[in-house]
Amino acid sequence: MPKVALFLIALCLSSFLRAEPFERTLRLGCVQWPPYISDKLPGKGFLAELSDLIVTASNQHLDVVIMPWKRVVKGVDTGDLDGSLCMFKTEERKSRMHYIEPPLLIEQTVVFHRKEFTPEIEKLADLNNYHLGILDGSSYQKDEFIQKHPKLTVVNSFENMFKMLAKGRVDIVLAEYRNGMAVIADTPSLDFEQFSVLPYSYQHTDVHIVISHNAYKSEELASHLNKVAGGVIKSASAKALYERHGILELPELKPLSSE
C-alpha cells in the first residue's frame, strides 16, 4: 500500500480516536426546578434547552435526567451521572466537579413570607428569630449559619415548603426567586396573592453545567465544553430561549447584612 495512503488512514484513525470521547450521550441530572427544569415544560425547560445547545455544539447528545436533588448530587459524586445542568457554585463542590464557564444564568435566593405576616429582617442574624424552611439538599444547607439556625425545618420539595408557609407551619422560607414564583403559580392549592418577598437577598448564585470528576475523561470533556459554552450563551438562539420561556428579571434587592 502506498505510504501516502497509509498516512491518510493513520491520520483519519487518529482524528477518530481523538473525537470519540466527545461523541457520546451525556447524562446530566437536575431536580424538578420550574421554571428552569420540569417534565411539564416544553423541551423540559430553559436550562435543558440551553444545555442542549451547548452539548450539541460540542458534538454530543444530551440526556436530561430529572430526579430528587440528593440523588443528583450523589450521581455527580460517584460518576453515575456525567454531571448536572443546574449546579450552584460552592468552594466545597469545586473539589469534586468541573464547572463549565460562563454560568447559564444568575439566580437570587430570597426570603419568602406570607403577606399577612411581614417579618422584621434587615440582617442575617434576624433570620434566627423566625421559623425557617429550606429545601433538603440546597447549597446553603451546609452554610454554618443555616446549620446553627435554632428554628430550622428541612423540607423534601419546593411545593411542600410553600404549602407549609401558607399554613403558618414556618414563618419564612429561603428559595430562589424565579423558582419560588413558578412553584407558587403552578401549585393549584396555593394563592399567588398570599405571598411576598422581603427587599433583601440571602445570596446571589451562578447556575452552571458541571462535569463529574469521575466521568470518562472528565478534564478533556470539561475543556471541550468550555470552548463552546461562551459562544452559545451569547448567541441569538440562547436569547430566544430566555424570551420564549419568559424568564423573569431579578428584582433589585439589597444583600442581608452580616452585622
Image (spheres, rainbow, N blue to C red):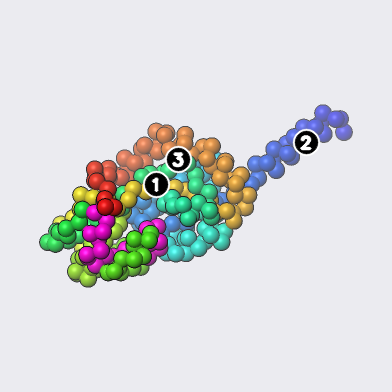
Q: Residue at x 27, y 56 (%)?
A: 124
Q: Which residue is mark 3?
A: 102
Sequence-wise first label, 1 or 3: 3
Q: Is residue 224 shown in magenta?
A: no
Q: CA distance from mark 1 to mark 2?
A: 45 Å
Q: Which residue is mark 2?
A: 9
Coordinates of residue 219 in the picture (x, y in percent)? 60, 46
Label 1 crowd (10 A; few <14 / some 14-19 / many >=20): some
Sequence-wise first label, 3 or 2: 2
Classify residue 181 by image quadrant: bottom left
> Relative to 26, does residue 138 appear above or below in the rendering?
below
Out of 252 and 183, give the one closest to the viewer. 252
Amino acid type of the residue that numbered disc 2 sits on in the rendered structure: Ile
Q: Which residue is mark 1?
A: 206
Q: CA distance from mark 1 to mark 3?
A: 9 Å
Coordinates of residue 154 in the picture (x, y in percent)? 33, 68
Q: Which residues are magenta?
A: 123-142
Sequence-wise first label, 1 or 2: 2
* Residue 165 visible in this rendered orientation of the protein: no
Does 88 sit left or right of 57 as displayed? left
Out of 143 and 214, give the one closest to the viewer. 143
Label 2 crowd (10 A; few <14 / some 14-19 / many >=20): few
In contact (CB < 8 Å): disc 1 and disc 2: no
Label 3 crowd (10 A; few <14 / some 14-19 / many >=20): some
